[in-house]
Image (tube, rainbow, N blue to C red):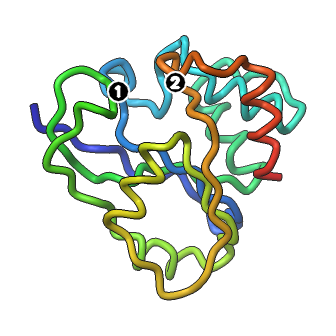
Amino acid sequence: MKIKSFPALVNPAAEVLLLGTMPGVKSLAMNEYYGHPQNYFWKLLAAVFEEEIPSSYELKKEMLHRNKIAVWDVLQACEREGSLDNDILNEIPNDFTAFLNEHPKIRLIAFNGQKAAAFFKKHVHLDKEYNLITLPSSSPANAGKSFEQKLKEWKAII
């Protein structure tokens, strides 16, 4: 099935770009980044910034803006059945040259998992240097690390 990602969540003050691969089935149905209740994305960010976990999507977006975080996906579109990144086929990347030119304050690009980093490396060639880090995936499918272990690594975004 052909699926498309969401527009970026970004504001002019953003300094960190957090990149996933492509929204999962639950997120697409909810029309929200990281909508699956078992995904640790919002819980990790709240813990990193020592805030309460926002109770609504609007409050989640406000938390991103307040902390100068942009969220997007490496891929603009792909074919995939289900939610697993390993099942992605015929991927089309987002236009990072235009995006980064429009958001010159971004200094760090952090990947939410190995697959996001791999697709970025495969498809994106940057004109200038950025700090790039790969974080452990916030997905419930990534059970190899505890929440506390993930949080320790996610603190690198601040």
**Amino acid type assigned to the residue bearing label 2 in the image:** Ser
Q: What mark, if any, has residue 45 been given in the picture?
A: none
Q: Are marks 1 and 2 in contact (CB under 8 Å)?
A: yes
Instruction: Name the residue rendered at 56%, 33% in the picture.
Output: 137
Q: Residue 128's spot in the image, x, y percent?
A: 56, 86
The image's mark for residue 24 is 1
Camera-side residue of 7 and 119: 119
- Label 1 sits on what residue type? Gly
Q: Residues within 10 Å of mark 2 (few under 14, many from 20)?
A: some
Q: Is residue 112 above or below residue 57?
A: below
Residue annotated with mark 2: 139
Name which residue lies at 82% across and 43% down: 155
SS type, badge 1:
loop
**Image quadrant of residue 49?**
top right
Which residue shows up at 36% across the image and 45% down it? 6
The local crowd at label 1, few if under 14, some if 14 to 19, many if 20 or more residues have their Cα within 10 Å, is many
Q: Quadrant of residue 121?
A: bottom left
Looking at this view, name the residue that lies furthest to the right. 50
Q: Is residue 85 above or below residue 102?
A: above
Q: Nearer the viewer, mark 1 or mark 2?
A: 2
Helix, strand, or loop for circle 2? Answer: loop
Spatial CA distance of label 1 from label 2 is: 10 Å
Q: Position of residue 19 (x, y in %)?
A: 51, 50
Relative side of 30 to 158, left or right: left
Residue extending farthest to the front is: 144
Indicate the position of residue 31 as horizontal and vertical percent values: 37, 29
Image coordinates for residue 94, horizontal then vertical, percent:
33, 62
